[in-house]
Image: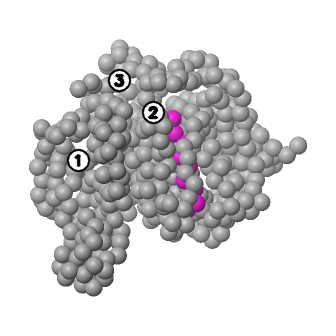
């Protein structure tokens, strides 16, 4: 990967690694990815918030012919996930097989490897979603 | 001459968390490919294609934070012990720090001492907090260990890890450290040279002069310094490259099987290297009662052992349910065959 591109990814580490969003101080709308101007009321008064990472699958597809940097991961599910705070995120699903995915499936955010460009390039990490972990409390 | 390591202020574990990937391969399946039989363990964990030491450390760290109930901005150090760093040069701990929201007011570094790197981080965190240099420090032990295909190590080399947030002893700590002891010599029982993909080991040399000498002397040294015998401990967790070694060490030291079993996970998840005793201790903390005492002895090739004595406190009852337990991850499993395992371990050139 050309060194120039590193800064492009580095700038978004906060949202990619831990799903940091923004909340409009004026109207309360929550955005992901973060925004500097509210697309609801036009206010520039925004604060950073930590999203819970919990959501539901709205729709999905299976990627079988991936773009460069994703080849080794194929086939992989790509989904629209509606976060419990409202925003809809496009993300990969992980730790799940095709036949287990369903509309409305409850998922949670995990930070995983997203993409590699070459053996000597940087590794990009970011959010993916997996089925909610079953615990002994459930 | 005092050999016990003990800081000025008493310190303990504010929060802990483990993580084990969901994929498993049975030793039988590895044996099918390489024509082997008679296996050291039943099955081992395999990382997902998108998992590495950094992602495993992140989930373990998030679980530790949930139990600690602290603001990640209060953590002044994150140290990750691993021999499977995603980068040869570039710290894993900065990735973890960024992912849990602990940057930028902290120290971060990766530790390497084969399977002992995780407890090295714990020792250092005890000193950092116990000297009051910092309020909280996080120590992580994690690996996605690789064995040369067909080698003995391939039957046990596994993936997993655990994170511990160390803070001053208080009502908020789930267990406190009574003292620790380290025993180190220059013993080349297992190594990996620069640019090599797989480690080499000294076969039978890894047993007597390496594992047993260091584990037994570290355990004995700590017990002598504290004036304890095996009867004073309710649990013992030893480094677990397989099932046989820790059970033999326990027998030599005089620990009955029932004190070792709750923290002995290698038979079903494999050897998680720098994560091994940290994951074992997390499984014990998941079930231990306040007042119970645990002996914790790691081993790292090269070679050395760190031994700790910890006493469980009341806060464990309230905190253990705040994050997934070690067995929640052990029970979440999906078997894969050798072909998929080879894909997960990136053996294919595409």
Q: Nearer the viewer, residue B184 or A113?
A: A113
Q: Residue furthest bottom?
A: A26
Q: Residue furthest top?
A: B35
* Residue at 56% across, 17% down: B203
Residue B150 falls left or right of residue B251? left
Which x, y percent locates residue B343?
28, 30
Reading the image, the residue beneath label 3 is B30
Question: Numbered disc 2: what chain?
Answer: B
When the figure is inspected, residue B236 is found, relative to residue B66, above or below; the finding is above
* Residue at 32% across, 30% down: B346
Question: Which residues, given as a range, are shown in magenta?
Answer: B75-84
Which x, y percent locates residue B23?
32, 39
Which x, y percent locates residue B199?
50, 23
Circle nearer the N terminus (2, 3): 3
Same subunit, tags 1 and 3? no
Crowd class of label 1 (few under 14; some 14 to 19; many from 20; radius 10 Å):
some
């Amino acid at each position: 990967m050309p060194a120039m591109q590193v800064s492009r990814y580095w700038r978004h580490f906060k949202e990619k690694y831990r799903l940091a969003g923004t909340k409009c101080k004026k109207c309360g709308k929550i955005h992901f990815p973060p925004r500097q101007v509210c697309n609801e009321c036009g206010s520039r008064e925004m604060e950073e918030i930590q999203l819970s990472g919990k959501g539901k699958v709205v729709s999905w597809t299976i990627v079988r012919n991936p773009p460069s940097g994703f080849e080794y991961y194929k086939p992989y599910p790509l989904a629209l996930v509606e976060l419990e705070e409202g925003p809809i995120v496009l993300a990969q699903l992980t730790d799940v097989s095709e036949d287990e995915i369903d509309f409305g499936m409850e998922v949670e955010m995990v930070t995983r490897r997203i993409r590699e460009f070459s053996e000597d390039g940087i590794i990009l990490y970011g959010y993916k979603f997996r089925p909610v972990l079953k615990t002994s409390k459930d | 001459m005092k050999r016990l390591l003990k800081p000025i202020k008493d310190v303990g574990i504010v929060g802990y968390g483990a993580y084990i990937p969901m994929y498993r391969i049975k030793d039988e399946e590895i044996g099918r490919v390489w024509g082997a039989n008679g296996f050291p363990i039943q099955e081992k964990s395999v990382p997902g294609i998108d998992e590495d030491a950094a992602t495993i450390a992140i989930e373990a760290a998030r679980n530790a934070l949930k139990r600690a109930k602290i603001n990640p901005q209060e953590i002044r150090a994150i140290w990750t012990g691993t021999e499977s760093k995603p980068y040869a040069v570039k710290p894993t701990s900065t990735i973890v720090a960024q992912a849990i929201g602990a940057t930028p007011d902290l120290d971060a570094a990766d530790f390497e001492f084969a399977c002992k790197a995780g407890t090295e981080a714990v020792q250092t965190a005890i000193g950092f907090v116990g000297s009051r240099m910092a309020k909280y420090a996080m120590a992580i032990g994690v690996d996605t260990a690789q064995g040369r295909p067909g080698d003995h190590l391939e039957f046990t080399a596994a993936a997993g890890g655990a994170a511990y947030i160390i803070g001053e002893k208080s009502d908020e700590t789930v267990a406190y450290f009574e003292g620790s002891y380290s025993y180190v010599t220059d013993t080349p029982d297992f190594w990996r040279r620069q640019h090599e993909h797989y480690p080499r080991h000294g076969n039978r040399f890894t047993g007597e002069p390496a594992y047993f000498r260091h584990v037994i002397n570290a355990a004995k040294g700590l017990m002598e310094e504290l004036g304890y015998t095996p009867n004073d401990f309710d649990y013992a967790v030893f480094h677990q490259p397989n099932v046989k070694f820790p059970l033999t060490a326990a027998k030599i030291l005089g620990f009955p099987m029932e004190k070792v079993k709750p923290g002995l996970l290698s038979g079903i998840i494999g050897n998680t290297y720098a994560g091994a005793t940290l994951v074992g201790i997390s499984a014990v903390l998941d079930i231990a009662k306040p007042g119970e005492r645990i002996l914790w002895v790691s081993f790292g090739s090269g070679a050395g052992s760190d031994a700790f004595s910890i006493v469980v406190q009341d806060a464990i009852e309230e905190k253990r349910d705040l994050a997934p337990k070690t067995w929640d991850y052990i029970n979440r499993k999906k078997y894969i065959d050798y072909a998929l395992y080879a894909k997960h371990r990136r053996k294919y050139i595409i």
